[in-house]
DNA sequence: ATTCTTACA
DNA sequence: TGTAAGTA
């Protein structure tokens, strides 16, 4: 599919799609016309990219782990460098802590909303 | 009508 | 990121 279709199906602008490619997050093939030709698989890849980016991972780290994601280029277990593995484990800990903080805040709101009185006008 | 690259705001 | 330019 062409970039315009990809943009509509992923909700990501063509501009950003090209940027992801520049950062090594996507590698769509080109048609003889030079136009990018995305596959269904790339739609899922963009979902992963968005999720990881939202989680705070760098495009650098994401680019490095893309081949390991389901639907990646490799069919066999992808060899991860010790360096990347260290980065990912550090991110895992950071996200676990962040999740704990968010859960704590959620519980505070639970308590407040559960006991809140609704003033009637 | 769409996409491409490069570049500026 | 959005957009303009000049193409293909």
Image: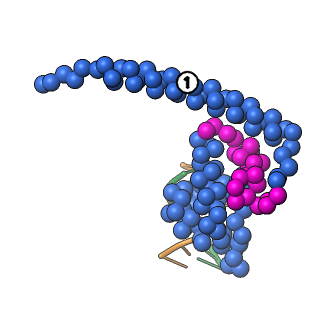
Chain colours: A blue, B orange, C green
Name the residue rendered at 36%, 20% in the picture: A112
- Horizontal placement of A53 versus A76: left or right? left
The magenta stretch spans which residues? A55-76
User: x, y (%) of residue A61?
Assistant: 74, 43
The residue to which callout 1 is attached is: A101
Q: Is residue A110 visible?
A: yes
- Magenta residue check for A64: yes
Q: Is residue A22 visible?
A: no
Name the residue rendered at 59%, 53% in the picture: A47
User: x, y (%) of residue A67?
Assistant: 76, 54
- Horizontal placement of A97 versus A69: left or right? left
- Magenta residue check for A49: no
User: x, y (%) of residue A85?
Assistant: 81, 39
Name the residue rendered at 12%, 25% in the picture: A121
Name, please, the residue furthest toward the left: A121
User: x, y (%) of residue A19?
Assistant: 65, 55
Name the residue rendered at 29%, 20% in the picture: A116
Q: Nearer the viewer, residue A108 or A15?
A: A108
- Horizontal placement of A53 versus C2: left or right? right
């Amino acid at each position: 599919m062409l970039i315009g279709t990809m943009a509509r199906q992923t909700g990501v602008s063509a501009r950003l799609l090209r940027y992801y490619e520049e950062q090594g997050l996507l590698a769509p093939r080109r048609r003889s016309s030079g136009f990018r030709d995305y596959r269904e698989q790339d739609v899922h890849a963009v979902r992963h990219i968005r999720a990881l980016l939202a989680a705070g991972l760098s495009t650098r780290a994401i680019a490095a782990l893309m081949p390991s994601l389901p639907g990646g280029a490799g069919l066999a277990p992808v060899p991860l460098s010790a360096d990347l593995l260290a980065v990912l484990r550090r991110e895992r800990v950071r996200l676990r802590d962040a999740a704990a903080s968010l859960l704590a805040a959620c519980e505070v709101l639970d308590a407040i909303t559960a006991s809140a009185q609704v003033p009637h006008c």
